[in-house]
Structures are given as C-alpha cells and as structure tokens.
C-alpha cells in the first residue's frame, strides 16, 4: 500500500526539483524543519493541523521561487546588474546594423537587376530578420554571462563615475555649424561650375570631360542652385533662431526630397551623368560601368538625404 503524502511532502519535493543534488538533502531537511516548526506554532494557537499546514505553505509561496532564493538563482532574463549595458548595446546595434544590412541588400538587388517589388520585399525581410537576430543573440550572450557568474561580476559593467555623463548634444545652431554649411554649399556650387567649364575626368585625345551631363544646363543646374540658396537661407535661419525646430526640420526634409527626387529621376532617365563619359573611358564595359556607377550614386543620394533629414529632426527633438 502506497504511503500517503502530505502537502508538506509535495511542497518540499517541488522545491527541491531545481536544487543541485549536492545541496538537496541539507536544504530539504532545513525546509521541512522550518515548515514543521511553523505548523506546530499555529497548532499551539488553536488552528487545526490541515488548516495550519495549508496556511504555512501559502505564506511560503511558489516552491520554485523559494528554491531560486536558496541557490541564488535569478528568475529574470537580464537582471539589474547588466540590464542597462544590454539595453544600450542593443539600441546601438539596432541603430547601425539593420540600416547597413538594408542598404547592402538593396544595392546588391538593384545591381542584379531585380524589380522594385522584389527589392522592397527582400529589404523588409532582411531588416526584420536582422532586428530579431540582434535582439536574440545579444540577449543570449548577456543571459549566459549572468547565469555563469553566479552572483559575481564578469567585468562587463564598470563602476559609474561622473566622467561617464554624456556630453550635451549639439543643436546645430552654433556659428561653426553655419559656417560649415555655407562652406559646403559653396564648395558644391564651385565643383558643379568646375565640372561644366573645365571638366573633372581626363581622357586622351578628348581632354577634360565633365561628369555631369551638359544637357542639364541651364535649367536643371539653375534649379539646383536655387535649392542650394534655399539651403543656405535655412542654415542662416536656424542659426538666427538658436536651433532647429520641427518647422525648420520639415523644410529641410522637403528640400532634401526635392533634390534627391530630382537626382533619382534624372538617373533613372540616364540624364544625370555625361552619356559620353564611360563609353570614352571604358568602351568595352561602358554599359556595366554606367549601371554600377548610376546605382551607387543613387544610393549615395538617398543615404545623404536620409541622414541629413533624420539628423535635423533629432536636433529639433533635443532642442524642445
């Protein structure tokens, strides 16, 4: 005939399931003794045994939680010791790796001649996959470190000091920012003029050749110069107001969309790059080189416009 088990027997057995075998006998005896003492104390106060036993076990709570306390085993995925380091690293990786992966996939798919729908589908799929993998593997590494150390410090997190305080973020309103923006626009305008009137690529016997198509003059280049003047006025306005705001960031986004959109349309129509350039430089592979340069140039335009727009909105957000 099987021996009847009590609630205490079942509780002790449940608590000892996750305890290392070497500690099991001692902890089992300690736990059982503690339960018996509390039960007897309640009985002495007049409670029935069954009621007293149930009340004591209820107060002790989940046996797995109790066992985790005995063995100093954390019941969280990433505990407070490593949480901030884990979260900061995760945010940094999420800010860099998915964008690089998406850019690389889009560039590779475009160079291989894939359609727009295929490119978008692959970029979305790869980006989501990268985000999930970064979260999983980063968390797994910290999980292993935390569980392996058994309460000791792995040296991953250093003691905080005031030297760790972040510098105040630049709002992009300083005189140096204004000067840098104006100088950049002046250099860009000078480079466009030099390209047209002098040329930037030399090929014998033709001599110096422009990179941009001569057909862009005067209307397309004139429109670009107007947009560059608007960019300069925007930089002056931001400096005068003491920083970016959502309005100026939106104007900046609009200018970037106009410039990038125009450049991409011209690239798609093969009107941006001098059509005589690559047939003169590499007559045997002109088509391939043109396709590669056009694709890379287009992605560069998108990347610069996106970075400049996001940067402006971030500065506007920090200035609020």
Image (spheres, rainbow, N blue to C red):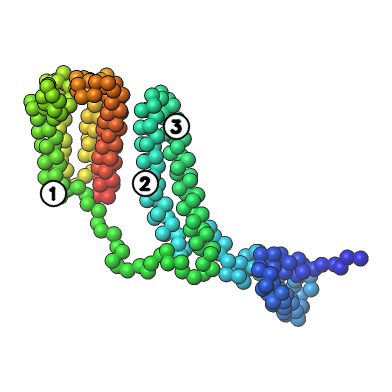
Q: Is residue 42 visible?
A: no
Viewer-side residue, 57 vs 298: 298
**Neighbour tally class for label 2: few under 14, some 14-19, many 20 plus, Cα within 10 Å:** few
Identify the residue at image location x=41%, y=59%.
85
Q: Is residue 62 above or below residue 104?
A: below
**Neighbour tally class for label 1: few under 14, some 14-19, many 20 plus, Cα within 10 Å:** few
Viewer-side residue, 285 vs 173: 285
The circle on residue 176 is 1
Identify the residue at image location x=28%, y=66%.
163
The answer to the question of whether label 2 and label 3 lie on touching residues, with beta carbons closer than 8 A, is no
The circle on residue 192 is none
Q: Position of residue 190 (x, y in %)?
A: 9, 33
- Residue that extends furthest to the right in the rendered view of this protein: 1
Identify the residue at image location x=49%, y=54%.
139
Viewer-side residue, 299 vs 183: 299
Q: Is residue 120 visible?
A: yes
Q: Position of residue 237 (x, y in %)?
A: 14, 41
Q: Which SS class for mark 3?
A: helix
Q: Is residue 297 above or below residue 220?
A: below
Which numbered disc flags the more N-terminal residue, 3 or 1? 3
Q: CA distance from mark 3 to mark 1?
A: 41 Å
Residue designated by label 2: 95
**Neighbour tally class for label 3: few under 14, some 14-19, many 20 plus, Cα within 10 Å:** some
Residue 73 appears left or right of 304: right
Residue 298 in which image quadrant: top left
Residue 205 appears left or right of 55: left
Q: Is residue 68 above or below residue 292?
A: below
The circle on residue 122 is 3
């Amino acid at each position: 005939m099987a021996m009847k088990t009590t609630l205490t027997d079942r509780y002790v057995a449940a608590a000892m399931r996750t305890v290392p075998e070497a500690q099991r006998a001692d902890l089992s005896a300690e736990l059982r003794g503690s339960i018996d003492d509390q039960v007897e104390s309640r009985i002495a106060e007049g409670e029935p045994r069954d009621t007293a036993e149930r009340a004591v076990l209820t107060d002790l709570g989940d046996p797995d939680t109790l066992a985790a306390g005995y063995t100093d085993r954390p019941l969280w995925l990433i505990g407070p010791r490593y949480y901030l380091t884990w979260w900061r690293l995760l945010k940094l990786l999420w800010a860099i790796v998915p964008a690089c992966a998406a850019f690389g996939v889009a560039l590779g798919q475009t160079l291989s001649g894939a359609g727009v729908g295929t490119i978008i589908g692959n970029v979305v799929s790869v980006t989501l996959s990268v985000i999930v993998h970064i979260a999983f593997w980063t968390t797994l590494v910290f999980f292993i470190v935390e569980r392996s150390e058994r309460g000791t410090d792995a040296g991953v997190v250093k003691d905080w000091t005031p030297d760790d305080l972040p510098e105040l973020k630049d709002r992009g309103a300083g005189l140096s920012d204004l000067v840098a923006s104006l100088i950049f626009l002046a250099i860009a305008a000078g480079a466009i003029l030099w390209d047209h009137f002098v040329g930037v690529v030399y090929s014998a016997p033709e001599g110096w050749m422009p990179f941009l198509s001569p057909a862009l003059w005067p209307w397309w280049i004139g429109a670009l110069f107007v947009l560059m003047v608007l960019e300069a006025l925007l930089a002056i306005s931001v400096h005068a107001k003491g920083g970016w705001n959502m309005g100026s960031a939106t104007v900046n986004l609009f200018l970037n969309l106009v410039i990038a959109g125009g450049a991409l349309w011209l690239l798609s129509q093969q009107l941006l790059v001098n059509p005589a350039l690559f047939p003169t430089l590499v007559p045997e592979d002109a088509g391939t080189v043109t396709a590669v340069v056009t694709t890379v140039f287009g992605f560069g335009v998108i990347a610069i416009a996106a970075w400049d727009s996001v940067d402006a909105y971030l500065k506007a957000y920090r200035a609020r």
